[in-house]
Image (tube, rainbow, N blue to C red):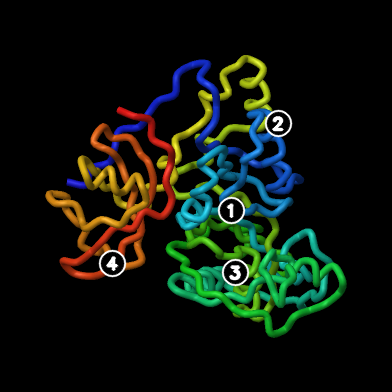
Amino acid sequence: MTEPAPRRVRERGEPATDGLFNVLKPPGMTSHDVVNVLRRLTGLRRVGHAGTLDPGAAGVLVVCTGHATRFVRHLQEGEKRYRAEMVLGVETDTQDASGRTTAVAEPFEIPWSEVDAALASFIGTITQKPPMTSAVHYQGRRLYELAREGVEVEDRPSRTVEIYDLRIVSVWPPDSPAATLGARVLFDVTCSSGTYVRTLCADAGARLGCGAHLGFLVRTGVGPLRIEESVTLEELEEARAQRRLSEYMLPVDAALEHFPPVRLAGEELHRALHGTAIGWPAGVERPRDLEAGDFVRLYDERGRFFGVARVEGEGTSLRLHPDRLLPLEPA
């Protein structure tokens, strides 16, 4: 059976090296600013984040340290959850509140039911054109670099993303039967990695015919990591002063639950630890929806996580090719 492996609990005072921090990023800081704080607190150079949050946004930022940085790409693949505010009737050049106003709609009245239906219509697989303020590369340069020079790239490539769920939490003004100029919609959205919520707001405004922009954004979760369990930079500063920073560090696999677990032993474990592809382990149940290109979490016979492997082949000839590995101390 591919049962989840038991979590390893770090002991008090144990040095913080390879792991994750579920950081509550405050507004006003870049994601790289947060990485620099963690570098200073941990004394490590190998620190990185798994998914940028805009400077004006707040919420869950997964920060990896040590060998955990090898898994940044995989950590980014987990679903993201946000609480966002959409402001109707006003468009900006950044698609959010930090930008310059580019258009203000004529007075309008749109029933809230139509606003709800417009947002719900984005649930499923959609295409988005990344905003010019994004870090997407275009002909060797970042879009935001071109935007700072006043360049607008009209043919920037679209990307396919998935909106799993989107629900309105509240509207303002609450006592109005319809949305009017400046109305605000607070909503929760669960989406795939790579989704731009600011673009979602702009596209919804276009669909409604009044225009819109993102008022504010809070990331409430990344995969299994939730904002309720996140830690502030102030708490980390205090923990470092008290030599208990490790208590806030999570094991790498804490954020990889979107990959099914597989336990290995004997020769199969030995080969996998050395990066050699292996056949699907005998006696291990294979998830029905597993297919080539998917990934699995790898554990040894003691339940210690040591990496992820890419699934190759098909049918009964599936193989596991180690993709990213952690050093594993002898049992």
Query: Which of disc 4 and disc 2 is earlier in sequence?
Result: 2
Q: Which of the numbered marks, if any, corresponds to residue 200?
A: 3
Identify the residue at horizontal 57%, vertical 72% (top origin): 111
Query: Which of disc 4 and disc 3 is earlier in sequence?
Result: 3
Rendered location of residue 290, percent (x, y): 26, 63
CA gap, disc 1 to disc 3?
18 Å
Who is closer to the viewer here, 201 or 4?
A: 4
Q: Quadrant of residue 85?
A: bottom right
| Residue bearing mark 4 | 291
Q: Up-down: is 269 above or below 41?
A: below
Identified by mark 4, the residue type is Glu
CA gap, disc 3 to disc 4?
30 Å
Rendered location of residue 24, percent (x, y): 61, 39
Q: Secondary structure under badge 3? A: helix
Q: Residues within 10 Å of mark 2 (few under 14, many from 20)?
A: few
| Residue bearing mark 2 | 40
Identified by mark 1, the residue type is Gly
Query: Which of disc 3 and disc 1 is earlier in sequence?
Result: 1
